[in-house]
Image (cartoon, rainbow, N blue to C red):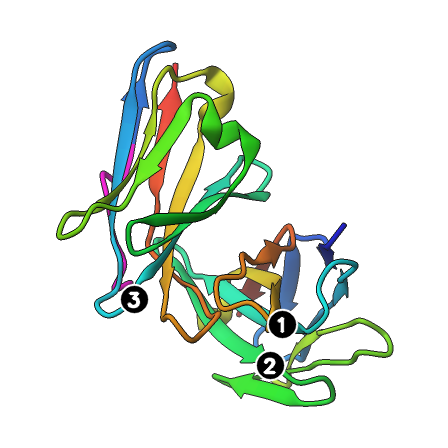
Amino acid sequence: GDSVTQTEGPVTVSESESLIINCTYSATSIAYPNLFWYVRYPGEGLQLLLKVITAGQKGSSRGFEATYNKETTSFHLQKASVQESDSAVYYCALGDLASSFSKLVFGQGTSLSVVP
Amino acid sequence: NSKVIQTPRYLVKGQGQKAKMRCIPEKGHPVVFWYQQNKNNEFKFLINFQNQEVLQQIDMTEKRFSAECPSNSPCSLEIQSSEAGDSALYLCASSRRDGNTLYFGEGSRLIVV
């Protein structure tokens, strides 16, 4: 079936250090996968961080970047220099571009703590 | 801040009791999804609607779970007879007709005691 696997947390990073959260997917029933990163900050709802609909393209938001790599079936999230305000739970998700009503398949989430 | 409004934020029910959660989708979004997120952070898709019509649903929702999105009223998800295993965060999301990006509410956390 379709699935998403991401870096197992919790992850602790010092402020101003770089970050990578790995995400790999398996899209056995999805002809045209598209990929998302969602984030849940403490006390808030799940919100879209970035998305990419075309293989080979990169998405970016709030200093985060992720490149959709069809060959390695990956969509790793990276940031060059994290801040304390980036502490949150990050979710990688897989959708079906061919369906306007496609349900998303989520990874298990990666809890990130950025310490001073 | 979420534009998808979910109520209540928390509800505590005894086993066998009904539990009802409501969702107002973002304005202009005709497609509504319900997900269950368990204590292990795993998401389970339950059901989705376009306007008032069910698009997809899993088998579980055909038994104890029911959902509707009536015209001019909030969408709702109801568990007829709550079980301990239903304790979870229930997330509502909405999307535009021509898009597949989901916008989530803050969720309703159900605790079944």
Pinpoint residue A14: horizontal percent, then vertical percent: 61, 71
Residue A7 appears in the rendering: no
Residue A42 appears in the rendering: yes
Pinpoint residue A85: horizontal percent, then vertical percent: 44, 71
Pinpoint residue A31: horizontal percent, then vertical percent: 72, 69
The answer to whether B99 appears left or right of B52 in the picture is: right
Chain letter for mark 3: B
Would you say the residues marked 2 and 1 are in contact, meaning their CB atoms lie under 8 Å apart?
yes
Callout 3 amino acid: His
Circle number at residue B64: none
Q: Is residue A52 above or below residue A86?
A: below
Residue marked by disc 2: A52
Circle number at residue A35: 1
Q: Secondary structure at mark 2?
A: strand
Q: Main secondary structure of the magenta part?
A: loop
Give the camera-side residue of B61 and A109: B61
Quarter of the image that includes the C terminus of chain B: top left
The answer to whether A58 appears left or right of B65 in the picture is: right
Give the camera-side residue of A3 and B29: B29
Q: Secondary structure at mark 1?
A: strand
Residue located 71% across and 74% down the image? A75
* Alpha carbon distance from label 1 to label 3: 21 Å
Callout 1 amino acid: Leu
